[in-house]
Amino acid sequence: MKILKEGGHRLFESDPETTRLISELLNDLEKNGLDAVRKYSQRFDNWNPPDFELTSAQIEEAVSRVDSQIIEDTDFCQTNVRMFAQAQFATLQPVEVEIRPGVILGHKHIPVHSVGSYIPGGRYPMFGSAQMSIIPARVAGVKEVLAFTPPVKGEGYYPATINAMHKAGADRIFILGGVQALAMMAFGMGVFEPVDMICGAGNQYVVEAKRQLYGRCGIDLLAGPTEILVIADDSADPALVACDLLGQAEHDPNSGIALVCLSEAFGRKTIAEVEKQLTVLPTRDVAAISWANNGRVYIASDAAEAIAISDDYAPEHLEIHVQDLEYYAQKLCNYGSLFIGEETTVAYGDKSIGTNHILPTGRAARYTGGVWVGKFLKTVTYQKMTPEASREIGQVTERQCLIERMEAHALTAAMRVRRYANKA
C-alpha cells in the first residue's frame, strides 16, 4: 500500500474536552429542566419561543407553505423508505421450536414503546432525515414518536422539514436542537414521559450526548460526521469519483473522505479533478476544509489489499467503481451501506432510493449496521415445558449449579425434580 494523500484524525473517539463539556451540559439539563433547555437553546441557536412544540395549526401552516413539487418528491422518497422497511419487517418472524420432547423455546419481536427522533438541521435543513428514523419506527409498531429538529437561524423552522416529519408519522414535533433536545427526550422534563430510545444522526456533540445518555435510554447507534470511501480501479471515471467524494465533503469540515485506487496515475487524476471541481463548487467553503484536512488517497497493490484497506477504515458509505463488482461486493465486510457501481451514489441513499441514511461512523461499521426496522424491535425469548421435561432438565441443572456452588439455584431445580418425580 502507498499513501498518496494522508488525512487527519478520524472522530471515532470522543476527546476529553468534548466529554467534559457534554457531561456538564447534561447534568445541568437534568437538574434544571426546561429552564436549562431555554438557556442553551438561546445561547446556541438564538431560539426561545413560548413553546418548543408546534401546535396542529402551526404544523398545518408550515405544510401549506411547502411547494407542491417538494411535497410530491417527499412523498416519493417516503414511499420508497416505507416499502423497504415493510419488506425488512416481513423477514422478522417469530420462532418456536421443540428442541427435545416437552422443551419448547421461542422468540418474538416486541417494538419499543416510544422513540425520540432527531432530525439534524444546523448547517443544512436535512429534512430527508425525517423519514429515515420515523418511518422504520412506525413500521416496527412503535406507539409514540416524538420528533425534534433544530431551528433554522433567522427563520424559526424550515417548512419542508415540518412537512416531512408530519408525513412520516411523528406524533409530536418540537423545534429544538443539539444536546438540549436529546436531554429533553431522555429526561422528559414534565412535558412527556422519557423516551425509550433516541434515534438520529448529528455532530460530534450530539454523538457524545447519545453516548453518555445510553443506559438511561436506548440509542440507535453512534452516527457522527459523515464518511465516504470509494474503491476505484482504472476503469472508473476520475471526474465522477471526485464528484462523489466532494458530495460528502460538503456536509461538515470533519467529514471523512477517502479513495482507494489501484494505480497512482488514477489517484493523481482524481486529486486533480477534486481540486478542479472545488474551484466552482458553491459549498467549497466547507468541502475544501474537509478535503484538505481529512481527505485520504491510498494506492493498493491489488483488489485484496484494496478490500483490506476499506475494511480497516470501515466507512459509513462505501462506493465501488470497479469492473468486477460482484467480487468486491461479496468480499467487503465493514461498511454502513454499499453502493455498487457508478450508477448509484451516496446522495441516492441519503435522499430518495429507500435504504436508510442513519449509518455507523468512526469505524462502528466493524460491529453494527445502520438504522432499520429491526433497530426498534426487542427480540425476546421465552421457554415452556412439560412436567416430564422439567424433571429431566432439572436433574442436569441441579448438578451444574452445585458445581458452581450456587446452592439456591440448585434448590429451584431440585424442588421441581421431586415435584414431578411421579410424572416420569
Image: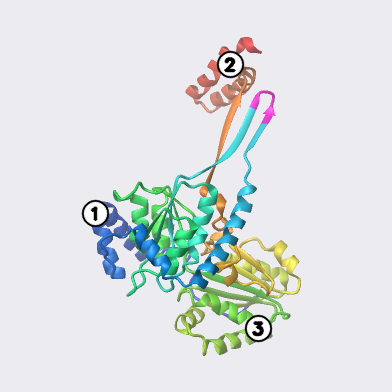
- Up the image or down, 255 lies above or below 336; here it is below
Is label 3 or label 2 in front?
Answer: 3
Mark closer to the chain start, 3 or 2: 3
Prevailing SS of the magenta stretch: strand
Q: Mark 2: which amino acid?
A: Val
Mark 3 lies on residue: 238
User: Residue placed at 48% from the left, 62% from the top?
Assistant: 130
Disc 1 residue type (three-letter): Asn
Seen at 59% across and 21% down, the residue is 394
CA gap, disc 3 and disc 2:
72 Å
Residue 287 percent location from the top left of the image: 49, 80
**Which quadrant is home to the C terminus?**
top right
Q: Residue at x 55, y 79 (%)?
A: 246
Name the residue located 54 percent from the left edge and 48 percent from the top edge: 140
- The reply to whether residue 94 is in sight is yes
Work out whether residue 51 or residue 217 is closer to the camera in this orientation and state it. 51
Give residue 32's mark: 1
Question: Which residues fall within the magenta stretch?
Answer: 98-103
Q: Position of residue 87 (x, y in %)?
A: 63, 53
Q: Which residue is mark 2?
A: 417
Given the image, on which type of amino acid does mark 3 rest?
Pro
Q: Is residue 197 left or right of residue 400?
A: left
